[in-house]
Amino acid sequence: MRELTYVARRTVEWREAPELRVQSADEAIVAPIAATSCDVDSMILAGHGFIDPPFALGHECVARVVDAGDAVTAVAPGDLVVVPWSINCGTCDHCRAGLTAHCGSVPHMAMYGAPIGGSWGGLFSDLVRVPYADAMLVPMPAGLDPVAMASASDNWSLSWRLVAPHLKSRPGARVLVVARGSIGLYVCDIARALGASDILYVDPDPTHRALAESYGARTAETLEPVRHGFDLAVEATGRVDQLAITVHSLAPEGICESGGNHFRPGELPLLDMYLTGVTLRIARDNVRAHIPDALDLALTGKVAPERVVSHILGWEQLPDALPENHLKPVFVRTID
């Protein structure tokens, strides 16, 4: 089998890896059929990551189960499933509390697509081992398009978590989105569907702004701090200077969710945040806990995640096409 391997800035290639077979009663082997790049993959490909290559890339996909251990009951060969980006057992204290990105049964930060917390391979691979199939895999609901939902492993479901619980507790909130990729656009879609009274989307890319406008957002190329302007803000740039402007624009007791990967240091306006009463969360997402809710929202038809898919490409195009600057390419193949 092959793994798509990140080898240098803007360079990936297929590399041979040992064939995968079920080795325990609890695991499954899956074959990705619709895989896409996370916003952080774009940063890695641009050379802004913190892990030296080579390593297998990819942590967002819908897959087909090709084999499963004797103890697996939630899925069976032939099923379509969402594969969450982080490895989790489902039974440790952290997993039972919903903190699946902090599973106590595997090394800290165990995940697909980067060799931290062990080497688990990537979801741009011909086959993938899922060590805790019942705990990790989420059956794909009938009626959802795997291409549209290829990002349910991370960015789509993360975007649901960034905004949906807050709009439930603060109906009609004013929402600021400062972004550079798919997360911000998904947030606009979800925020509109869940009743945000006003959405401002900030992104220098005019194509992204046009898409945000189709979701009902106002848009701007840059953000001028608007004191006490927004109840909820989402920052997904990975730039601390943009995060600083974002939190400066919150209303008293406002909430800021940072969905960006901050590989670079910086400073925040802590005194102003203290005086305003800002709540700031910067966190890896415990995605497995809310993939079902994010899929349920997609099933309502009130959202249109398929609009964010910028290109639909074949599996064999991965080495050439993935390093290009596409917003959200989805790579597909047919598995019998």
Image (cartoon, rainbow, N blue to C red):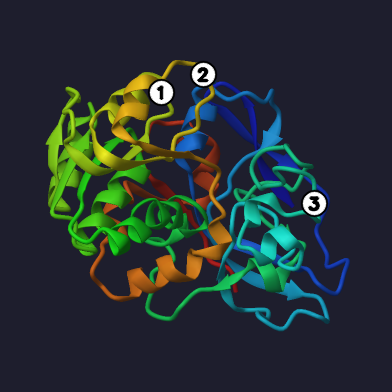
> Tags 2 and 1 in contact by the CB under 8 Å rule?
yes
* Quarter that holds the C terminus: bottom right
- Give residue 106's mark: 3
Judged from the image, the secondary structure of the residue bearing numbered disc 1 is loop
Decide: few, some or many residues near mark 2? Use Cα within 10 Å; few <14, some 14-19, many ≥20. Answer: few
| Residue farthest toward the front in the current orientation of the protein | 275
Q: Nearer the viewer, residue 22 or 99?
A: 99
Secondary structure of residue under mark 3: loop
In the rendered structure, find residue 258 and report the number of the disc placed on it: none
- Using the image, determine if residue 127 lies above or below residue 321: below
For marks 3 and 2 on the same chain, the one whose residue lies earlier in the sequence:
3
Q: Is residue 269 visible?
A: no
Residue in the image at 50% along x and 44% along y: 317
Left or right, residue 258 beside residue 73? left
The percent coordinates of residue 211 (x first, y second) are: 19, 45
Q: Is residue 175 among the parts visible in the rendering? A: yes
The numbered mark, 1 or 3, whose residue comes first in the sequence reads 3
Distance from disc 3 to disc 2, alpha carbons, whole Å, reads 27 Å
Quickly name the residue at label 2.
Answer: 264
Describe residue 17's horizontal placement relative to residue 296 as left or right: right
Q: Is residue 187 left or right of residue 63?
A: left
Q: Answer with left or right where residue 84 lies relative to residue 241.
A: right
Res 239 label: 1
- Which residue is situated farthest in the right direction here? 23
Residue 120, relative to residue 265: is it above or below? Answer: below
Check disc 3: other Cα within 10 Å, few if <14, some if 14-19, many if 20+: some
Amino acid type of the residue that numbered disc 3 sits on in the rendered structure:
Val
Q: CA distance from mark 2 to mark 1?
A: 7 Å
Q: Amino acid at mark 1?
A: Arg
Q: At x 30% / y 64%, what residue is drawn?
A: 168
